[in-house]
Image (cartoon, coloured by chain):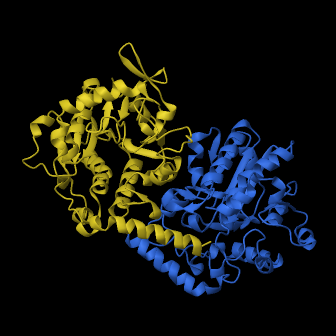
Chain colours: A blue, B yellow
Amino acid sequence: MADSLIAHNPSYQVVIGLVDKIQQQSHIDFVAPHQIVEIKTIKIPDFEGLLGKFNLYEMSCLAKPYFANYFFDTHQSLQKLLYFDTDMLIFDSLQPIEDSLENYDIIINPHVTAPFNDIHSPHLRIFLNSGIYNGGFFALRRSNEAFRFLNWWQQYVTEDGYVNFCKGMFVDQLCLNFLPLFFKNVLIEHNPGYNISYWNLHERTVVRRDEKWWVNEHFPLLFFHFSGYQIDKPNQISLHQDRHQWEDRTDIHPLFELYHNGLLKNQHSSFMQIPNVYFKKPWHDKFSYLKGWVIVICRKILKELNA
Amino acid sequence: MRKTNFMNICFTICTNSHLGKAKAMADSIIRYNPHYEVVIGLMDRLTSQVQQELLSPHTIIEVEDIQIPDFEAITKKYTLFEISCVGKPYFAMYLFEHYPELSELFYFDSDIYFYDTLQSVEQLLDEHDICISTHFTHDLVSECQPQMRNFLNAGLYNTGFLGFKRSAETNRFLEWWANRLQHEGFINFAEGMFVDQLWVNFVPLLFKKVWIDADVGHNVGYWNFHERVVTLQEGKYFINDTTPLVFFHFSGYEPTVPQHLSVHQDLYSFQSRPDVVPIFEEYRKALIESHHAQFQTLPNAFYKRRYFYQKTKGLQKKLVVVLRNLLRVLES
């Protein structure tokens, strides 16, 4: 992700917020010129307490507002801050986002702008559970409103940053539903060139023209979100969906090939083996096959009970 | 007043048990807006137990007359509350079809009461086709109920108030909404469902010319008490001193439990909110006048209690807790 960003935006610095500890100096060298900031550096209040409450996924999500606040605090000349999930590739200049931040303090993307008309997954309802806006991208301008939002968000996820649909919680993302209601100068960016992923492929097509990627003919592709992509299943668009078949979406094949090669080049498979220093693999990980079945059965019973 | 030479309609939807509330609501609309007709969409049947003369001059349309597709299946799979929430898009489409001169249509829940003209409501559709109502515009941090996250389950917008202008976009929305409610109108937070209301989260994203109403004089309810205060000035109610109160939503208020301003919340009481006491007292009297107590006992013609479900509800709740805790461990 970082390499693709600076390939099109060489004036940017990419900082990787690490919800972990750096294991070896060679990792720092490998990731260069991008910077790594470990989570212990940003001194989250009651960090040990949070480790006891949340799992690894929840912790990775709630770290966003904390890191954002840290960067604004420690870089006084920083006017504009962009966040991208790690599973993205950037394909163009980010100037349009910077231009929008001249008029808005906060920018987020909706997941979809057109409904699905089928029974495949993901179902439209998943966004009613997990949030109508995608937490994989946000952009902030240094401003009172952005700080008001970050402080609110930080406090919110510290209390409610769990995965628990029936209690109205989904990590950092679901509460973003409140963003345009509680805060001013918020842009819900509908531009289809932003944050394309498996959930909005039904409303977006990609074409190559004049050495550039375009979405729906007219919109430059800014960034693609390869959510749910697995390196060992290169012809599967995402493990989270069954709506779009690989053979039916030849328009995005080149993008996925680029991403696949990028992951290979950056030794993704070997980094995946490194255990997290804060969260150990649970004991039941050894019984993953049986565990999978128990999970499926539990979910089926809950569905029958309408719970 | 706008459009006195065109038809103006508001509609509400209720079962027989809520006809008293609907009558109080409808009377309060036409008190300030005599050029309006109020239509009561009845998710029930007008049996001999219903004293229709008490509901005059308002129009009642029974749900079986609007021919909701697969209505029988709907009555079998949904609870009574879920059934009553299905009607909104279908009644809206029916009214647009059967009143060809109708250009705008407003929906209000039956437990709403009016205090002013609808002028500020009508203006919302000047430049827009669809109007929805946000629950609130300020965060509230509290240990009491409801919590903010409850609105992430139940919906950002309150479907107790909706505005529709006759247009292709409105039609597209109503058809989409109606299709959702055929099979996905349950209360099931884990599956991303809360009757008709949670679906409306999508409306500003999927449809054009949508206005999100945040006027503090509209749809005042317990969920926005933290940002709204009622005052009485020269015989008129105002919100936050300067905005006229147009309508108040008495969600969860039952005159048989007069000490609670809503059974759905425990943050506010009449002691902590003396500003709303006169409004609730007036509403309580209005419900007596509209014979609410008499209508309240009427059973619904469609909903049949599910014996097994009722008897094992407690056990099912315990099982759900166990399974959810197990899933959390296994998926960590």
Q: Nearer the viewer, residue B5 or A266?
A: A266
Residue A271 shown left or right of residue B3 in the figure: right
Q: Position of residue A175 (x, y in %)?
A: 58, 51
**B98 shown above or below B233:** below
User: Is B273 positioned to the left or the right of A82 in the image?
Assistant: left
Give the x, y percent position of residue A270: 80, 80
Image quadrant in which the N terminus of chain A is located: bottom right
B280 to A1, vertically: above or below: above
Residue lying farthest top? B234
- In the image shown, does A140 or A112 lie closer to the viewer? A140
Residue B35 appears in view: no
Image point (42%, 49%), residue name? B169
Which quadrant of the figure contains the C terminus of chain A?
bottom left
Asked if B173 appears above or below B215 in the picture, the reply is: below
- Between residue A240 and residue B263, name the one nearer to us: B263
Q: Quadrant of residue B283?
A: top left
The count of marks equals 0
Q: Is residue A177 visible?
A: yes
Residue drawn at the location 66% of the way across and 53% of the way down: A158
**Who's the residue at 55% across and 40% down the image?**
B140
Query: A86 or A291: which is nearer to us?
Result: A291
- Which quadrant of the view contains residue B233? top left
**Residue B297 point in image, percent of width and height:** 17, 46
Q: Position of residue B240 (x, y in %)?
A: 49, 24
Using the rendered view, name the quadrant where residue A31 is placed.
bottom right
Residue at 48% over, 20% down: B242
